[in-house]
């Protein structure tokens, strides 16, 4: 049986009239949408819209059969000096597990291109811990929400609509946006405190000092006034939620400062942090699932130098996808699912372009001289399985229609078989090795 025999599309029980509709356009994984067009959310409309060009199975720009493309892709992966497995954020947990098995076969680097594995210090939660909560806990408990140097409207378009605007079961909610721009229009229940990006960390440290009763007389007027207003708002609140972002924190100091601040608050009253990830820039909604799956299998959320279930080396800001591609350290890149724009840019700008193998439903935006595309069924409409929302909630996806092409998990499974076949053909029989 050839690897291609594994790729006959399986009939799905999905029914467009009854199937649950989940948008995988960002880490919110919204499951309350009623249609796939004019949803009111830019991320959802992009996710469900038909792509400009569907993927077609090709080898070096020429149409090819699935068997030929699989064999060619497996040969290039198996003979690569150092491969990289990336993409992944638009894949389900089930597909990510299979991709992890494939990465082990190749001792490949693994990284989905998330912001935390690009930090030299790695994820905040792994360094100092975080006091976090589910999105619904913010919605149902927090009477004070502080947007600390982030704007969810840009990265997670429906976050405010779903988890901030709904009224509290009891009482009322106030919001404060801290940063260059206001998250919400000015109103009696919303305050914008203008703050430059470079003051985000000092503000967190000064507010923590104020909470501990250590006032500073060396703070300038405007910043001192901001700290005073924040402290007063926190004092009158019953439950405080800080909404933060991991995307603009290359050093990790912002995350560290905010984690320490929230911990200090939580010792005095109910308080927690909602750290928002890459959102619409992740290339899919399952970046949290990729991090969890890789952590379970390899001991790290990404930035994995060589996949090994018995112990992989975690190299944040060294083995992250963008740096590996930009520095020419990988000669073959396997893209599982859709690729985030910043990873597409890294491939397009690479001084030494690697071989790129795409397992995707959307035609790549950049054509590479040595590229193999293996077309899979529509990810928005035929995907089944599970993903993790950014706050850790498990979301189940039901296909809206039966696949007319191989699904992504089927394609990864076929690739695993094809690589094994290539390796067996390249290895001489045991008797011949012994006689030599």
Image: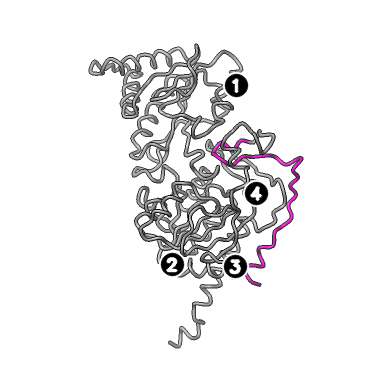
User: Which residue in the rendered view is the most extreme toward the front?
Assistant: 52
Q: Quadrant of the N terminus?
A: bottom right
Secondary structure mainly formed by the magenta segment: loop
Q: Which residue is mark 3?
A: 64
Q: CA distance from mark 2 to mark 4?
A: 30 Å
Q: CA distance from mark 3 to mark 4?
A: 24 Å
Looking at the rendered structure, the secondary structure element under dot 2 is loop
Looking at the rendered structure, the secondary structure element under dot 1 is loop
Label at residue 166? 1
Of residue 13 and residue 33, the one placed in the foreground of this image is 33
Q: CA distance from mark 2 to mark 3?
A: 21 Å
Circle nearer the N terminus (2, 4): 2
Horizontal and vertical percent for residue 32?
66, 33
Task: Determine if residue 257 is in view.
Answer: yes
Looking at the rendered structure, the secondary structure element under dot 4 is loop
Circle nearer the N terminus (1, 4): 1
Q: CA distance from mark 1 to mark 4?
A: 30 Å
User: Which residue in the rendered view is the most extreme toward the left?
Assistant: 218
Looking at the rendered structure, the secondary structure element under dot 3 is loop
Task: Determine if residue 297 is in view.
Answer: no
Write the residue at 40% across / 28% down: 149
- On screen, residue 369 versus residue 405, left or right, reads left
Q: Which residue is mark 4?
A: 383
Circle nearer the N terminus (3, 4): 3
Of residue 358 and residue 88, the one placed in the foreground of this image is 358
Residue 21: in magenta span: yes
The answer to whether the residues at label 3 and label 1 have Cβ atoms under 8 Å apart is no
Q: Closer to the observer: label 2 or label 3?
A: 3
Q: CA distance from mark 2 to mark 1?
A: 52 Å
Q: Which residue is mark 2?
A: 80
Q: Which residues lie in the magenta part?
A: 1-30
């Amino acid at each position: 049986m050839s690897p291609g025999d594994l790729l006959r599309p399986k009939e799905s029980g999905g029914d467009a009239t009854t199937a649950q509709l989940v948008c995988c356009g960002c880490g919110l994984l919204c499951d309350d949408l009623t249609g796939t067009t004019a949803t009111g959310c830019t991320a959802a409309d992009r996710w469900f819209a038909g792509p400009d060009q569907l993927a077609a199975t090709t080898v070096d720009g020429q149409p090819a059969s699935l068997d030929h493309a699989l064999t060619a892709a497996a040969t290039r992966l198996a003979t690569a000096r150092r491969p990289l497995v990336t993409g992944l954020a638009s894949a389900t947990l089930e597909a990510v597990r299979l991709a992890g098995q494939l990465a082990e076969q190749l001792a490949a680097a693994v990284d989905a291109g998330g912001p935390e594995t690009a930090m030299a210090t790695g994820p905040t939660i792994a360094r100092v811990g975080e006091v976090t909560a589910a999105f619904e806990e913010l919605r149902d408990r927090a009477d004070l929400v502080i947007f600390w140097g982030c704007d969810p409207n840009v990265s997670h378009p429906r976050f405010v609509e779903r988890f901030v605007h709904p009224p509290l079961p009891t009482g009322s909610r106030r919001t404060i946006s801290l940063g260059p721009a206001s998250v919400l229009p000015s109103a009696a229940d919303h305050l914008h405190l203008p703050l430059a990006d470079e003051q985000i960390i000092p503000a967190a440290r000064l507010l923590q000092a104020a909470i501990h009763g250590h006032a500073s007389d060396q703070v300038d007027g405007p910043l001192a006034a901001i700290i005073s207003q924040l402290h007063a708002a926190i004092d009158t609140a019953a439950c405080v939620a800080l909404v933060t972002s991991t995307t603009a924190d290359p050093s990790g100091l912002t995350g560290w400062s905010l984690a320490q601040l929230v911990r200090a608050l939580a010792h005095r009253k109910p308080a927690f942090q909602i750290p928002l990830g890459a959102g619409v820039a992740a290339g899919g909604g399952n970046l949290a699932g990729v991090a969890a799956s890789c952590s379970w299998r390899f001991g790290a959320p990404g930035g994995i130098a060589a996949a090994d279930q018995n112990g992989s080396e975690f190299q944040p800001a060294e083995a992250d996808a963008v740096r590996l591609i930009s520095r020419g350290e990988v000669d073959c890149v396997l893209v599982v699912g859709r690729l985030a724009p910043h990873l597409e840019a890294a491939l397009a700008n690479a001084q030494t372009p690697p071989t790129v193998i795409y397992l995707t439903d959307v035609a790549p935006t950049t054509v590479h001289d040595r590229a193999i595309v293996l077309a899979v069924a529509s990810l928005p409409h035929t995907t089944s399985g599970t993903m993790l929302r950014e706050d850790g909630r498990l979301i189940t996806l039901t296909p809206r229609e039966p696949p007319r092409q191989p699904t992504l998990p089927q394609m990864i499974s076929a690739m695993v078989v094809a690589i094994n076949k290539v390796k067996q053909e390249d290895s001489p029989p045991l008797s011949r090795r012994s006689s030599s």
